[in-house]
Image (tube, grey):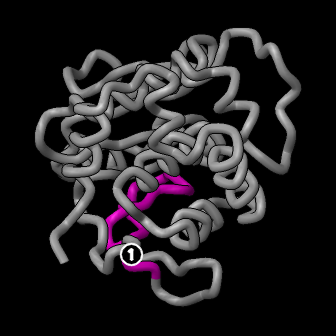
Amino acid sequence: MRPDKTGRPDKTGLDWPACRNARDLGGLPTVDGAVTRSGVLFRADGLFRLTPAGVTAIRAAGITRILDLRWPWECERHPSPFAGDPAYMHVPLLEDELSYDPPHDTYGPMLDHNGDRIARAFCALATAPPGGVLIHCHGGRDRTGGLVALALAVAGVTEEAIIADYGRSPDTSPAAMARTLAHVDVLYGGPEPYLHQIGVPPKAIDAVRNRLRRPH
């Protein structure tokens, strides 16, 4: 069991050698007093770093879909050990050539300029077979953080918990996620209206919500 940033044992951190930023998103509090289910949504950094023992650990974790959010050139340079598996899906989250300068203090522009790709990735999560879904990019921070935040938000996870989970990743500032959520609220009316606007159907939002939530 790995320690968290405070040095305390981290019960949701995963021993997937040699991933540096992997965790189960279960146990997060929701606004109505429930918590997210364990074993249904995981986040990680680049799986190309995994040792054989790490690959074995993921195969044993009941994961039925792996969403790789990296650019195609990243996948070519650092192939996933799961490429070719039925569970593996490559769903690039960003434009091939960015049409904006990404700031360091918010992911608002990422959401504004990549709606079609974000919608596709969200729907890939929504339509995953029963079992666990693993979302990752290269560092498990920016692209993964944005998509995970949307999934947690529609499941009713509190903003404080979404921000705190993002802040557990290395080299992050929780303020960046706080600004991102504020950006979505001001420009779109919240995460769920944002997803509707980029083309995510209501049934996909309901599917993600039902996957993540555990009754109070």
Residue beneath the point at 57% across and 72% down: 160
The prevailing secondary structure element of the residues shown in magenta is: loop
Position of the N terminus, as image quadrant, is bottom left
**Does residue 57 appear anywhere in the picture?**
no
The residue at which mark 1 appears reads as 29
Residue beneath the point at 77% across and 16% down: 98
What residue range appears in magenta?
10-28
Residue 49 at x, y percent in the picture: 52, 41
Position of the C terminus, as image quadrant, is bottom left
Q: Is residue 32 above or below residue 174?
A: below
Picture quarter containing residue 38? bottom left
Residue 189 at x, y percent in the picture: 58, 45
**Does residue 76 appear anywhere in the picture?**
yes
Residue beneath the point at 40% across and 73% down: 31
Q: Is residue 168 above or below residue 121?
A: below
Residue beneath the point at 64% across and 78% down: 5
Tell whether 5 sits left or right of 49. Answer: right
Q: Secondary structure at mark 1?
A: loop
Picture quarter containing residue 213? bottom left
Few, some or many residues within 10 Å of mark 1 (<14, 14–19, 20+): many
Q: Nearer the viewer, residue 65 or 85?
A: 65
Q: Is residue 129 above or below residue 37?
A: above
Q: Nearer the viewer, residue 46 or 191?
A: 191
Q: Amino acid at mark 1?
A: Pro
The reply to whether the magenta stretch includes residue 22 is yes
